[in-house]
Amino acid sequence: MEEMPEKVRYAFDLYFKQGITRTLWKLYYELVGNSHFDGFEPAITVLQDWATQYKWSDEVKRLEAEVYEQSKKEVQDEMTRAARSRIEKARTMMDAGAVIVDRAMINELDPISARTLLPTAKALIETGAKIERLELGEKTENFDPPKPIESMTDTELEDYLAKIKNA
């Protein structure tokens, strides 16, 4: 494409900035009395000639494609950032559940106390794991106990704790 002289480039830039409603007539009226042209006011036929000679329609398409690709990249980058943020929050939830299990020393508590703390830990770990897996496009699974926590034996409870901690 032929390089546009300064005045032509200036006129084209104004034309491009008009957006989807751009017309050479709107450009003409915008240029009337414009000091950039030092008293020279291009006639509509001059603008038409410039548009043809410098292939303004092709340049508009090229620039719009660039703007679209840049916008698309920015949206994708933002989506990636947001997904990473959600994954980090999900991992924080899982860590919080694991901390409840570890710091409470559930294995050392009496069964009634251990079973009281377990639902909160389970909910944090399970919710965090589901959020993380959904973000990564992986299959989610439930961490529902095979039977009510209150009726589990100590061995079943230990096995279940191991399962949700290693999720």
Image (tube, helix red, strand yellow):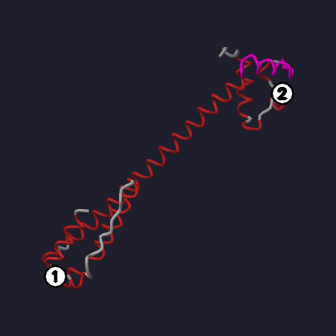
Report crowding for label 1: few under 14, some 14 to 19, many 20 or more residues within 10 A (C-alpha): few
Is 15 or 49 nearer to us in this picture?
A: 49
Label 1 element class: loop
Q: Circle 2: is it few (<14), some (14-19), or many (20+) Cα within 10 Å?
A: some
Q: Is residue 110 left or right of residue 149?
A: left
Q: Which residue is mark 1?
A: 153
- Work out whether 63 lies above or below 73: above
Image side of residue 65 versus residue 124, left or right: right
- Please name the residue that numbered disc 2 is placed on: 28
Q: Is residue 82 magenta?
A: no
Between 31 and 98, the residue placed more toward the observer is 98
In front: 14, or 137? Answer: 137
Q: What residue is drawn where x is 33% and y is 62%?
A: 129
Residue drawn at x 25%, y 77% is 146
Q: Amino acid at mark 1?
A: Thr
Mark 2 residue type = Tyr
Residue 12 falls left or right of residue 126: right
The answer to which image quadrant residue 65 occupies is: top right
Res 5 label:
none
Q: Position of residue 117 (x, y in %)?
A: 25, 78
Which callout, 2 or 1, points to the residue nearer the camera? 1
| Label whose residue precedes the other's in the sequence (2 or 1) | 2
Q: Picture coordinates of residue 58 (x, y %)? A: 68, 25
| Of residues 33 and 18, the one drawn nearer to the viewer in this rendering | 18
Give the x, y percent position of residue 42: 84, 20
Tell me: residue 57, above or below residue 85.
above
Residue range corresponding to the magenta coloring: 40-55
Q: Quadrant of the N terminus?
A: top right
Q: Dividing the picture into quarters, in which one does residue 163 lie? A: bottom left
